[in-house]
Amino acid sequence: MEIIKTLEGMKIAQRRRAGQRVGLVPTMGYLHDGHLSLVEKSLSTCDITVVSIFVNPKQFRPNEDLDTYPVDLKRDIKLLEDLGVAILFLPKNADMYPEGYQTYVQVEKITERLCGKSRPGFFRGVATVVLKLFNTVQPDVAFFGEKDRQQLAVIQKMVQDLNLDIQIEGLPIVRDPDGLASSSRNLYLSPQARQSALCLQEALQLAQRRVAAGETSAHKIRSAMQDVIEAHPDTRVDYISVCDPLQFNELEVIQGKTLIALAVHVGQTRLIDNCLIERI
């Protein structure tokens, strides 16, 4: 596996690809099974797979976990080498955001809700770094997980609006054996907090059962989900959303395709999860 640490080195590698189909998996490292499912999809459908690891400071607010975000580069390199990844791209912060940097990408409207509402500036940071990675790597296709469904929608909208010739592929949520959605931040959870964190999946399953049984009131679904979450110790709801899966507008009546998404603080750790349902 070739490890590239400079923007120029990545551009040189890009020029060597000679018409091959390049897949990009952008990550912030501390790889888990969700990341690896994206890598495996790229390996199976592309000639060259590039994985980037960059903990992007522009998507963290001052009171968030930038300084403590989990990092284990040696472990990540071993995982990617074992899978057969061609290139690992490790850009430096000073190269991505040199002194005097002042240009950002802002996708509007769909970033005003859910995580965009509770984490102002988050999606501006995401869109900016992803566009910079796209411009440097020049992939044909990029892979993102549906656990971050709003993020996936933001990237798709940016690609559409800026006429980028890149295919964006979203892949299903990968879950740990106990049902918790795979996340680098799961590392923060103590054994007791891990048990409480299962409330996210329990709440989503309850919502799915209620809708399948005929419930159409989004308010009742939100209320029932909140009861499930608050029954677990050391939990605090950030948001519970029953919304349109394209624009993320909150719904009053559940009909057709509906996204149920939530963010919950378990202790000091903020976790997200979602499911897509369809009521005919």
Image: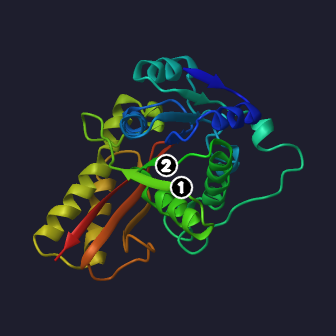
Residue at figure coordinates x 33%, y 47% from the top left: 173
Quarter of the picture holding the N terminus: top right
Question: In the displayed structure, would residue 40 be above or below residue 155?
Answer: above
- The part of the image, by quadrant, that contains residue 116 is bottom right
Question: In the displayed structure, would residue 23 be above or below residue 264?
Answer: above
Could you tell me the amino acid type at mark 2? Val
Instruction: Verify CB contact (< 8 Å) between mark 2 and mark 1.
Output: yes
In the current view of this chain or complex, which residue is farthest to the right?
A: 100
Q: Position of residue 25 (x, y in %)?
A: 50, 40
Mark 2 residue crowding within 10 angstroms, few (<14) / some (14–19) / many (20+): many
Whether residue 236 is visible: no
Q: State which tag comes first along the sequence, 2 or 1.
A: 2
Question: In the displayed structure, would residue 240 be above or below residue 14?
Answer: below
- The part of the image, by quadrant, that contains residue 175 is top left
Q: Position of residue 194 (x, y in %)?
A: 35, 36
Residue at figure coordinates x 66%, y 54% from the top left: 125
Q: Disc 2 to disc 1, how far (Cα)? A: 5 Å
Q: Kindly state the secondary structure of the residue where label 2 is placed.
A: strand
Could you tell me the amino acid type at mark 1? Ile
Closer to us: 201 or 16: 16
Q: Position of residue 65 (x, y in %)?
A: 61, 40
- The residue under label 1 is 166
Residue at figure coordinates x 59%, y 22% from the top left: 2
Mark 1 residue crowding within 10 angstroms, few (<14) / some (14–19) / many (20+): some
In the rendering, which numbered label is found on residue 149? none
- The residue under label 2 is 141
Q: Kindly state the secondary structure of the residue where label 1 is placed.
A: loop
Whether residue 113 is visible: yes
In the current view of this chain or complex, which residue is farthest to the front?
A: 18
Q: Indicate the colouring scheme.
A: rainbow
Q: Position of residue 258 (x, y in %)?
A: 30, 71
